[in-house]
Amino acid sequence: MQASRRKVSRRHALQAGLSAGAAFAVPTIIPSSALGLDGAVAPSERIIVGGIGIGRRGEYDLGCFLEQPDVIFTAIADVKQGRREAVKKIADTKYGTQNCTMHRDFREVLDRKDIDAVLIATGPNWHGLLAMLAAKAGKDIYCEKPCTKNIAETLIHRDTMRRCGTVFQAGTQRRNLPHYAFACELARTGRLGKIKKVFAHPRGMTALLSGWLPEAPLPDPKVDDWDMYLGPAAWRPFNADTLKDGFNFEKGGGFIGGGVPKGGGVLEWGSHCVDLCQWAVNDGPPPVEYHPPKGDEIVCRYADGAELIFREKDWIPLGSCPVRFEGETGWVEAGDSGKLVLSSPELLAGRKIEEIGGYPATFHVRDFLDCVKTRGKPKGNADAACNAHIACHAANIAIYLGRTVKFDNATNMFVGDDEANRLRSEALREPWRL
């Protein structure tokens, strides 16, 4: 959108064309829509978006994008023919055209110079690699979570977004909901006193394993491309149930293949709750010490002694994805109902916090699009996502090993623990590389 992202942006091209035209005394009729009149968005302000891997969650995200008047959704890449056709129908119906193109290979979308941004909503198996390839192709990125499969990929992902100047928004949409934002503000600004504990709900604290289902005959790759579906994941035989819900064999988004942990709820659900806890402690480095589960809790400690606690039970009934922040002088708890519970009504300081339940992503999508235009930093940026994901991956390693592990944020390595450090990364299947 800006010259720093492209040698010549659409806006500059349009301006140059109008300036050149001014040298001729030939009357020109310009439609009002081209000038942004009558409520239309001028072409220079439109954001052209392509989608990669749009299944059930992706269709919801797509709906949030299509609500925005400055978005033109123009291409879908998916390994499943049925999903390609379904998304094309949604987009073409929205615009009354037949312009949305379909692709089996995502690289065809990334190669298109007219596309500004991509929505990545594949399963977690592809998130990190796809985002890095998209960034290198000059695209801004809205990517569903979990964003990465391990600590090493998380760090490379963050560094790639920085190096490419990419506007990256992780799908942690609760950052753009008023009550969660206010709860985090109370913690960050000292209204609760020095923060002692932040609580996240993991919704499962088991290091699940990535298994194989019985082999079935391979489908026609033009209909369901199994090889592209697996992508960088370890090979396994085709099974329609594995393919049905889209990367469900890696729902946790963590380690895969060979009998190693794949994440469980600590990563899949925790990447929402832990992300909010990280925001509450000013998006600083993740904890440095991770203990295995004890009862229904996992305790992790930050360098300053504060604790991040994964807790299954004893939540105030405020809906899914609950978080709680406790300081020396007060506490706050929030959940997906849109409601807050505070240790004292004085913490509101006369403010009325809008209650928006159901964790809608519309505000998060709008935050992303605004940053695409301004080159600002969205709330779910790559740096914030990196720290939250490292915390989840490290906690998952402690679960898998069944013992305490210590993490050095300066070196991004586990301290004196070769076994834990081997779990920081994993091999990718040929020909894929980070």
Image (tube, grey):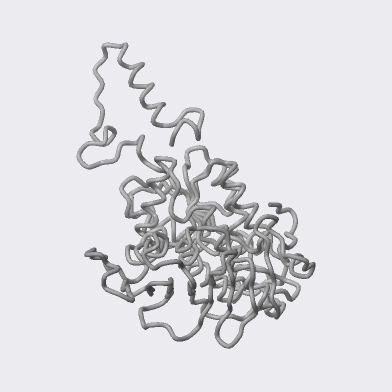
Please tell me which residue lies in front, 158 or 403.
Answer: 403
Residue 146 visible somewhere in the drawing: yes
Residue at figure coordinates x 35%, y 38% from the top left: 45
Please tell me which residue lies in front, 214 or 42.
Answer: 42
Q: Is residue 205 above or below residue 235?
A: below
Q: Is residue 22 above or below residue 369?
A: above
Left or right of 265 in this view: 357: left
- Residue 278 picture location, percent across and down: 50, 63
Left or right of 222 in this view: 167: left
> What is the quadrant of the N terminus in the image?
top left
- Residue with the most extreme bottom position: 295
Residue at figure coordinates x 73%, y 53% from the top left: 431
Residue 60 visible somewhere in the drawing: no
- Residue 339 picture location, percent across and down: 31, 73
Residue at figure coordinates x 67%, y 55% from the top left: 410
- Residue 28 picture location, percent across and down: 26, 21
Tally of marks:
0
Please tell me which residue lies in front, 115 or 158.
Answer: 158
Write down the quadrant of residue 87 in the picture: bottom left
- Residue with the most extreme left position: 38
Q: Is residue 209 above or below residue 383?
A: below
Please tell me which residue lies in front, 39 or 75.
Answer: 39
